[in-house]
């Protein structure tokens, strides 16, 4: 465990977890991450940043491309934030880094969020972008979905929705600490409550209630852990052994494997929630490099005539 991770854990526990002991405050959470994102440097010169405005005629929400000069594949990325905060700006550094490690163009989607827009608005927005990419000629075998926390759950829910709609599926999905059970029924919600440096357990049910707005918490569009996973593409899942959402990742991996979905589960100890998105950590940079290689392997293996991966 790096010294950067040790210091990050201390800062998160003091500033983030300690500061969120009370009821969920949407405005305060949005303000805090927006202020932080303003300090981020722009993407490196090797990555082209192209904002994409909303296109109401096609049902498309705003998005942005982060692309290397000669991309070999596409990543469709969905930011986390409990379905109520974070943005394109907060996850731009992660998307830019992933673009380089995967030799890809990354489309980061600014999906609608709660409480203004409730489930299934986010799924509808992401599915609309997937349809648009396919219509515009992007080959599904050249694409991998990716997302962190709520965005990881959203990636999984979109796979389920696309399959059920009869749409082609991407070559795989990379999920960082996916929040895929909005009923918050995993045992680690309690067993890892003290060890988790970011979250107090009461906050997740409050965030879930904003997004669900009365919809059952086990609805597969909100909680894809409870969906039929058969026929989905391979999954690469990363999580911390010491976060309250650990059980979402372990149960997803187990359920996917039982239902015939190829799944890899990568766990690290004493790391914060969605640590692969924290680029100041050497562990995050190494993991994103591993993800880039996996994305390249999955897209190459999915192409017609390719030899299947062992």
Image (cartoon, rainbow, N blue to C red):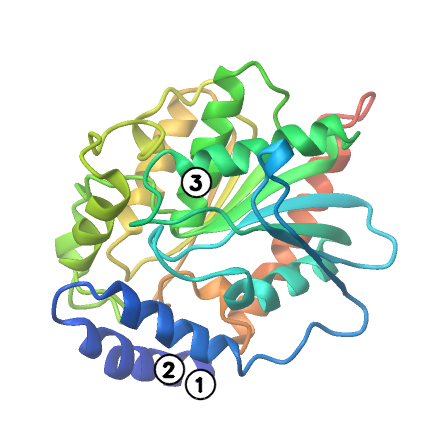
Asked whether residue 163 is in view, the answer is yes
Q: Dot 2, how many residues are within 10 Å of its Cα: few (below 14), some (14-19), or many (20+)?
A: some
Marks 1 and 3: CB-CB under 8 Å? no
Residue at the spot 55% in from the left edge and 46% down from the top edge:
146
Q: Dot 1, how many residues are within 10 Å of its Cα: few (below 14), some (14-19), or many (20+)?
A: few
Q: Quadrant of the N terminus?
A: bottom left
Residue 6, image x and y in percent? 37, 82
Q: Which residue is under mark 1?
A: 3
**Residue 122, disc:** 3
Q: How far apart are the two marked residues, 1 and 3, measured between alpha carbons?
A: 37 Å
Q: Which residue is under mark 2?
A: 6
Residue at the spot 42% in from the left edge and 55% down from the top edge:
80
Q: Quadrant of the C terminus?
A: top right
Q: State left or right for residue 128 relative to residue 133.
A: left
Q: State left or right for residue 45 relative to residue 94.
A: right
Say whether disc 1 or disc 3 marks the residue closer to the N-terminus: 1
Residue at the spot 52% in from the left edge and 19% down from the top edge:
163
Q: How far apart are the two marked residues, 1 and 2, measured between alpha carbons?
A: 5 Å
């Amino acid at each position: 465990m790096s010294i950067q991770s040790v210091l990050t854990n201390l800062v998160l526990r003091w500033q983030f977890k300690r500061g969120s002991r009370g009821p969920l405050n949407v405005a305060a959470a949005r303000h805090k991450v927006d202020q932080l994102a303003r300090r981020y440097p722009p993407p490196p010169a090797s990555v082209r940043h192209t904002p994409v405005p909303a296109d109401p005629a096609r049902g498309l929400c705003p998005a942005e491309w982060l692309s290397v000069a000669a991309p070999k594949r596409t990543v469709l990325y969905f930011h986390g934030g409990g379905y109520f905060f974070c943005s394109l700006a907060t996850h731009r550094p992660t998307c830019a880094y992933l673009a380089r490690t995967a030799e890809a163009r990354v489309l980061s989607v600014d999906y609608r969020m709660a409480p203004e827009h409730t489930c299934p608005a986010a799924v509808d927005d992401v599915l609309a972008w997937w349809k648009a990419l396919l219509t515009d000629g992007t080959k599904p075998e050249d694409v991998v979905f990716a997302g962190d926390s709520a965005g990881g759950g959203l990636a999984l829910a979109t796979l389920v929705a696309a399959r059920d709609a009869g749409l082609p599926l991407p070559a795989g999905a990379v999920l960082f600490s996916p929040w895929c059970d909005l009923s918050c029924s995993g045992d680690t919600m309690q067993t890892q409550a003290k060890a988790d440096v970011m979250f107090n357990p009461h906050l997740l049910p409050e965030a879930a209630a904003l997004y669900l707005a009365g919809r059952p918490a086990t609805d597969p569009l909100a909680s894809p852990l409870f969906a039929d996973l058969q026929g989905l593409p391979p999954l690469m899942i990363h999580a911390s052994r010491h976060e309250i959402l650990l059980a979402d990742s372990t149960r997803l991996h187990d359920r996917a494997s039982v239902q015939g979905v190829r799944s890899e589960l990568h766990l690290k100890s004493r790391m914060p929630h969605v640590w692969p998105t924290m680029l100041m950590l050497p562990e995050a940079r190494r993991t994103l490099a591993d993800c880039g290689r996996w994305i390249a392997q999955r897209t190459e293996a999915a192409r017609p005539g390719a030899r299947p991966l062992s």
